[in-house]
Image (cartoon, grey):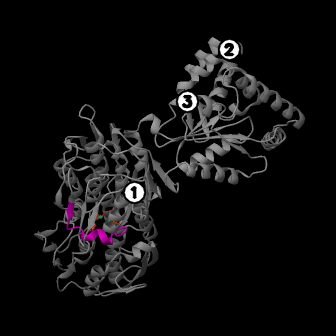
């Protein structure tokens, strides 16, 4: 997951390959709650692991449900209708699918059995309406107090005397989750008589009610319905765990990849999406119809979709999106690539979700250069005619972050000069899709020259490894420790007995080295060699063999291969001069020989290795001289390098300096 302050996307050009999507949020949280209310154990497979499901799981745990991991499944042992904990403060983040259903279930349970529960969330959750649900529950006899502003969480559920002598009436024009919540709680009220729920006024987001009804069926509750107007839970209904249950991949998450295929995949290599297919129980699968109307070519089978571009530019659309409120945001970005203005209608609920999504989309699309018209319940987006490098605000809304990543393909529009795009606070995707960007980067392609590289070269013990790792972490970029490639070759040569003068033998060894890098670890075949690579004898050998042109050539392509989306920080001795001469920023890091010898000394001592400062200084000076004077890739700053002497700087100050230079070279 990207936890950086921002994530820069270079211009993207195409997409190919296959993605497996995480589980559906809507199904996961319903299944978790139903399992928590049922008696016995429910083994849940392919559950979504994200912020929204974590708050639900934590709430169930606090309520006394059993939660265990069994292999890759999660086993929930439910309450069987009996409260074991009568007081709890539950924090539900910004998960509507946790807040609304838990309010109804706990209002009913605390009414029937006694108890006091306080439910709260992030500040935005306290701006998301819940009054219609509270009104319905109060009408039933539940006692609910607003702890902040009337009509909004946080709430206290404090017992009451729920009775079902009359139908429960609920409005459904602000959120369908209120009806979902009542449907899931109703079985607990059905012991004496049926429970009838009537919808007052127009119901929005109807397909989410279908998901609720389908999952209630799986848990033994057979709701009788009268269209969208009334729902009856029969007398004596009781949750019955299905034992095992599988969660489909998330159809709303699929929308980004369906759009990706429609924009950037070729018929010869369609984008494949695993985990959800046209037979999905999630309403957002209907996004596929909208994408097809815009020109996407989609094939589908059980649990998979394949998508490629059909029409280009895409075809403009005028669509009532009430049935796909979440996925419709993706259409607003696809509209940038259409042949005319696209209007998405009947989306008033966008204004009360993670943020005011109509306002957010309009503001951010305009930043890119698009013309946008917004109304109370619609948005019209005109295709891009000009484009600006933009830093996209994401408003802690996962869908804003995810759908705007698709704007990085604007270079495919004839006549537009591609610009980089910045996504601010990319970690907000954790609400439903923590690995969204990793998944995107596994299938999206950029021109190599567009993938930014930051090089940090410098002499031994200058601290470039630490600096590079910190800068890479701050930018969310890949890290190449090119010295480790040389040291691994040296280690392998020492162990295989290859002579230090055998240039051809060393080059062959370098070319075939089974090396693998992980954060803070280097693997040689199945062995973690991170510590061995730090050995002084390995370092000395590395310095000798790195003078051979054939060895350097053998390792060259391997280094170039590290230039992958979204970008690279490369540290070494010739990163800016030889390997990445087109790097966006080149830093040449130095420190006095005395400072470096002193640092190396402390490093060794701290590891319990005895060392002599004077000898270290001598070795270091000899190595500097060898590195500077060798004929192949001698150690010297690139002409366009920024020089940084960190003798008197903390690591934080060095990182800040490099990031400032980086910022100066970015258009944001
Ligand atoms: O019941 C559900 O799982 C959901 C219902 C929809 O909300 P509204 O009914 O408020 O539109 C949707 O936007 C949300 O992401 C999930
Ligand atoms: C509206 C959304 O979430 P929630 O379940 O919190 O309502 C969403 O995921 O787009």
Q: Which residue is mark 3?
A: 559
In the displayed structure image, the side of residue 491 where residue 364 appears, left or right: left
In the displayed structure image, the side of residue 450 where residue 337 appears, left or right: left
Which mark, residue 498? 2
* Pointer 2 residue Cβ closer than 8 Å to ligand 2: no
> In the picture shown, does residue 148 fall above or below 128?
below
Of residues 468 and 641, the one nearer the viewer is 641
Q: Which residue is mark 1?
A: 401
Residue 355 among magenta residues = yes
Q: Is residue 246 visible?
A: no
Which span is picked out in magenta? 343-356
Q: Secondary structure at mark 2?
A: loop
Q: Quadrant of residue 496?
A: top right
* Pointer 1 residue Cβ closer than 8 Å to ligand 2: no
> In the picture shown, does residue 178 fall above or below 548?
below
Mark 1 nearby-residue class (10 Å; few <14, some 14–19, many ≥20): many
Q: Ligand 2, what quadrant?
A: bottom left
In the displayed structure image, the side of residue 329 where residue 513 appears, left or right: right
- x%, y% of residue 540? 75, 25
Mark 3 nearby-residue class (10 Å; few <14, some 14–19, many ≥20): some
Q: Quadrant of residue 38?
A: bottom left
């Amino acid at each position: 997951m990207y936890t950086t302050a921002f994530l820069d996307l270079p211009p993207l050009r195409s997409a190919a390959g296959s993605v497996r999507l995480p589980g559906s949020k809507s199904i996961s949280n319903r299944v978790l709650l139903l399992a928590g209310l049922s008696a016995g154990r429910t083994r849940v497979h392919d559950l979504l692991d994200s912020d929204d499901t974590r708050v639900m799981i934590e709430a169930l745990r606090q309520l006394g449900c059993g939660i265990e991991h069994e292999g890759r499944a999660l086993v929930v042992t439910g309450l069987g209708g009996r409260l074991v904990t009568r007081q709890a403060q539950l924090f539900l983040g910004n998960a509507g699918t946790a807040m609304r259903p838990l309010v109804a279930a706990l209002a009913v349970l605390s009414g029937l059995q006694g108890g006091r529960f306080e439910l709260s969330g992030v500040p935005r959750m306290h701006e998301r309406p819940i009054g219609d649900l509270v009104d319905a529950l109060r009408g039933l006899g539940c006692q609910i107090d607003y702890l902040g502003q009337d009509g909004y969480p946080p709430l206290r559920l404090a017992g009451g005397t729920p009775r079902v002598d009359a139908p429960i009436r609920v409005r459904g024009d602000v959120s369908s989750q209120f009806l979902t919540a009542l449907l899931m709680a109703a079985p607990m009220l059905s012991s004496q008589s049926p429970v009838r729920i009537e919808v007052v006024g127009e119901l929005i987001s109807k397909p989410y009610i279908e998901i609720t009804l389908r999952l209630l069926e799986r848990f033994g509750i057979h709701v009788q319905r009268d269209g969208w107007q009334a729902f009856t839970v029969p007398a004596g209904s009781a949750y019955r765990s299905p034992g095992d249950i599988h969660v489909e991949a998330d159809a709303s998450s699929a929308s980004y990849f369906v759009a990706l295929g429609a924009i950037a995949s070729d018929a010869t290599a369609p984008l494949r999406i695993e985990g959800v297919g046209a037979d999905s129980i999630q309403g957002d699968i209907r996004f596929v119809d909208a994408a097809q109307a815009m020109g996407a070519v989609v094939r589908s089978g059980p649990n998979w979709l394949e998508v490629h571009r059909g029409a280009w530019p895409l075809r403009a659309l005028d669509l009532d999106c009430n049935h796909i409120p979440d996925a419709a945001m993706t259409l607003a970005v696809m509209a940038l690539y259409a042949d005319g203005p696209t209007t998405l209608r009947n989306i008033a609920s966008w204004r009360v979700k993670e943020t005011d999504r109509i306002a957010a989309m309009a503001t951010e699309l305009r930043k890119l250069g698009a013309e946008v018209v917004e109304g109370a319940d619609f948005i019209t987006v005109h295709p891009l005619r000009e484009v600006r490098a933009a830093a996209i605000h994401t408003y802690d809304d996962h869908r804003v972050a995810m759908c705007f990543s698709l704007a990085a393909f604007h270079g495919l529009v004839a006549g537009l000069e591609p610009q980089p795009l910045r996504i601010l606070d990319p970690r907000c995707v954790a609400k439903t899709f923590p690995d969204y960007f990793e998944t995107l980067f596994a299938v999206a392609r950029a021109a190599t020259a567009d993938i930014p590289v930051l090089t940090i070269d410098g002499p031994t013990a200058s601290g470039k490894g630490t600096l590079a790792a910190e800068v890479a972490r701050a930018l969310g970029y890949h890290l190449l420790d090119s010295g480790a490639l040389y040291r691994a070759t040296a280690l392998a040569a020492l162990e295989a007995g290859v002579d230090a003068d055998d240039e051809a033998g060393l080059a062959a060894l370098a070319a075939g080295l089974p090396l693998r890098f992980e954060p803070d670890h280097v693997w040689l075949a199945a062995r973690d060699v991170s510590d061995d690579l730090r050995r002084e004898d390995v370092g000395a050998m590395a310095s000798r063999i790195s003078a051979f042109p054939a060895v350097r050539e053998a390792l060259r392509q391997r280094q170039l291969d590290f230039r992958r989306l979204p970008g690279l920080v490369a540290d070494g001795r010739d990163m800016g001069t030889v390997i990445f001469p087109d790097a966006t920023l080149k830093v040449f890091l130095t420190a006095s020989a005395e400072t470096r010898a002193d640092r190396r000394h402390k490093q060794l001592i701290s590891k319990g290795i005895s060392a002599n400062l004077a000898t270290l200084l001598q070795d270091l000076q000899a190595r500097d001289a060898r590195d500077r004077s060798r004929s192949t890739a001698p150690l010297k700053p690139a002409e366009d390098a920024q020089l940084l002497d960190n003798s008197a700087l903390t690591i934080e100050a060095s990182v800040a300096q490099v990031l400032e230079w980086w910022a100066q070279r970015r258009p944001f």
